[in-house]
Amino acid sequence: MGSGIKFAHLSDIHIGIETHGKINPATGRNTRLEDVLNSLDYIVDEVINKDVDLVLISGDIFHRENPQPTEETEFARRINTIVTGSGAELVIVLGNHDYPSTSHKTAAVEIFPALELPRVRVVKRPEAVTITTKNGPVQVLCLPWIRKSALLTKDEYKSIPSDEIQRELERRMLSIVRNLIEEADKSIPAVFAGHFSVRNAVLSGSETTSLDIFEPSISRVELARESLAYVALGHIHRYQNLNDGSQPPIVYSGSIERIDFSEEREDKGFVMGEIVKKKDGWNCEFQFVKTPARKFFTVEIDPKAENESIGEAPGPLTPEDIEGAIVRVRYRVSDAEERVDEKKLLETFSRASSIKIERIFEAPAKTTRGTGLTKNMDAIEALKTYIDSKPELEKVSEKMIEYARKLAEETESG
Ligand SMILES: [Mn+2]
């Protein structure tokens, strides 16, 4: 044994996310920053303890393009721990969150190439880098996030019909992917590392609204190439292998911490794997490793059953679940005066790390603006009901109904 190349793959760290956090009085830091760093520490320890040869970070290191000095320093410390505490090589591919909003500016993570740290590479453009690990060479075919402006010039944007732009962007991205794979040296193992969308990947809840549906994406078939040993993806926050049961694994390792409530039911973590030579190529075995990510829970409360349920942990939640969790309690009311005892709720969840109470007001849905209209009336019936509710229309009611009938007949026969 020991002939393979051991690697760790992580992505979407999002250092700097502070939603649902508060200042920890003991450290003066946001609790969510501490959560992210805690999960990152867990990964760093694994990298050192398991004697990993290669660490692939597939983008979105920082949440904001201008991270705070604390955030930068804390990330740099962990990079330093890997470099000094292990023999691992590091490849960092930039994600969309890492890019500065103006293209000529420097991304925060580019501090590492500037320091000329040994064994750390930061990749900003599509390129193949050959890395010599302590267990042999490996090529990393990198496709960082590419802006649309890097794929198409302004003039091209103008000359291409708008309904063609999306396809043209994808065509160009695809040719980059194909070139990287075709030009790879077949005598050493190759892994692909990128930050982009693969079509039909399963999104995390919030991504169904936050990801740009017009961003170019690649078909998984393009990455399911025998010449690749592993595909390390970032961008989509839900862990998944898009080539289950086959080689190469095409993996989104997902975010290392929960970013918001939409990720509450997802396991968070990273990937540990090993690439081993076989007769005609390489084989990769890997496993998903969970990080000690902060728990998020949404609890729905029935205000009618207030007195029974509010004093204790509702539903399947145990006091251990609540301990340290970020909790959102929701209850629906139809009366503006209706309220549950929120003070009591806060007591119930006092062991949570944070609690947010959402009171959702739902107006009675029977009628529309007091006219007596309902959804299952046909048009004429609805018109009659509407006229009946408006005394000022009484005089013209017959004419209105007559016209409406004619109109209905016309649209039906036309
Ligand atoms: Mn991300």
Image (cartoon, grey):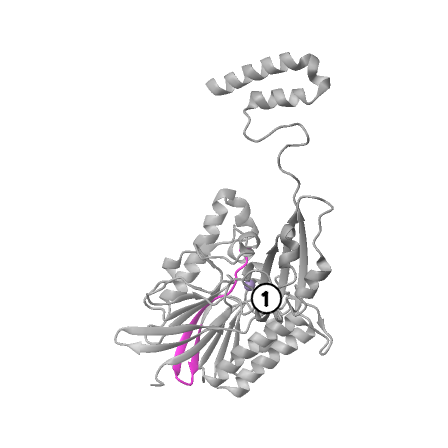
Q: How many marks?
A: 1
The residue nearer to you, when weighing 277 against 343, is 343
Three-letter residue code for mark 1: Asp
* Horizontal side, residue 347 vs residue 15: left or right: right
Q: Give how far across and how far down residue 165 sits, in percent.
A: 50, 47
Name the residue at 42% across, 62% down.
177
Name the image quarter holding residue 221: bottom left
Q: Give how far across and how far down residue 287 sits, in percent.
A: 41, 73
As displayed, is residue 203 above or below residue 16?
above
**Highlighted range, magenta:** 129-148
Name the image quarter holding residue 75: bottom right
| Residue 101 visible (yes or no) | no
Q: Give how far across and how far down residue 390 sits, in percent.
A: 70, 21
Provide the major secondary structure of the magenta segment: strand
Name the residue at 70% across, 68% down.
22
Name the residue at 62% across, 28% down.
373
Label 1: how many Cα within 10 Å (few below 14, some 14–19, many 20+): many
- Give yes or no for residue 139 being in the magenta stretch: yes
Quadrant assignment for the N terminus: bottom left
* Horizontal side, residue 16 vs residue 217: left or right: right
The residue wearing badge 1 is 98
